[in-house]
Image (tube, rainbow, N blue to C red):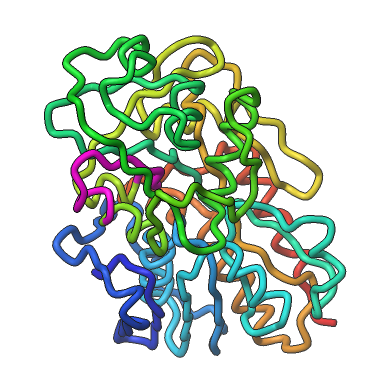
Amino acid sequence: MLRSSTLLRIAAPVLVVTTLGAACSSSKSSTPATTPASSAAPTRTSAPVSGTLNGSGSTFQQAYDQVAIQNFDQAHSGVTINYQGKGSGGGQTDLSNQVVDFAGSDVAETAAQLPANKGGAILYFPTILGPITVSYNVSSVKGLKLSAPTIAKIFSRKITNWNDPAIAADGNAGLPSLPITVVHRSDASGTTANFTAYLKAADPTDWTLGSSKTVNWAADTEAGNGNTGVANDIKAKSGAIGYVDFSDAKATGLSWAMVKNAAGDFVNAGLAGASAAAADATVTANLTYNPINASGAQDYPITSPTYIITYAKYADAGKVALLQAFLKYILGPQGQGAAQGVDFAGLPPTLDQKALTQVDQITVG
């Protein structure tokens, strides 16, 4: 299965993946996503849903979306679901302009964006979550540990060589004299927004570039398109470092750092630490939540939520029924169980139940 920034089309019973342009051509076909047999596809039903849904947005969640769409199709004939990975900002813009029926996003829309949504009020559906890794390419360095001040200085170019004393002070030995190449996202990205939100929260003194889907990076940094683009750029450049979702980092074969959390413990970028952070986060009334820099000893501090954003009302009753069925699969036991097979964590049960209950708020209007 391809895992790149692609247009994913499910037309029962055939899965067709069309690559979108040279900038989005990197794939991970050598590492197909697998799903536990007990949570792979829902049992085929006769539920009367059919039609087409179009979505775009987050590349962070895309590997999971591909599996969820394929599995959902196995239970519902006559269904076509398209998803284009183009970054959270691109998905939000497409939804605002009613180009798509739903957006994938790792961040909520800003207050300034909301009035521009042509379809009216929106709803957030948390789906899965996962760590954002600080991935690096230094063959001689194993088990790298990094604190927030060190990460902030590296990504703001205050630290430019791997043998810097600040990196050594985090508990790292044998650091080579090797220039650091910072790799970041080129597109408007929820991964960027959450990574920089962590730096802003954990070390506002050293991190002065703010937090947003786009950042004014230093001129001597490099940019990659989507999470896969950043991952591939890191892998291709000795001395490189960047931020990549756990699923893509693992599939690309990258090494990543243990990150010092708010409790003072170095925590690996794994699903257990992400789940712990999500469990410690406060859920708001619109079901958005912030697991970044959570305070628990087991919490991985750069944990990203991700959402499907929909309108509250659609003119087409068939589209409402299909969208509700798709969300109920994702938020049900089979959809949540499929997350781990592509290196994401499912939602905390209480949040998952709240999201399931909210599905019925999508209505015809």
Residue at image position (70%, 62%) is: 359
Q: Is residue 100 left or right of residue 141?
A: right
Residue at image position (23%, 36%) is: 255
Number of marks present in the image shown: 0
Q: Is residue 106 left or right of residue 269?
A: right
Q: Is residue 57 above or below residue 234?
A: below
Q: Is residue 341 left or right of residue 260?
A: left
x, y percentage for residue 168?
30, 13
Residue at image position (50%, 44%) is: 129
Q: Is residue 70 above or below residue 291?
A: below
Nearest the viewer among 259 and 361 is 259
x, y percentage for residue 179?
26, 35
Residue at image position (85%, 82%) is: 365
The magenta segment: 233-246
x, y percentage for residue 188?
56, 62
Residue 190 painted magenta: no
- Quadrant where the N terminus sits is bottom left
Nearest the viewer among 176 and 13 is 176
Q: Is residue 36 left or right of residue 275?
A: left
Q: Is residue 301 above or below residue 309?
A: above
User: Hey, which quadrant is residue 322 in on the image?
Assistant: bottom right
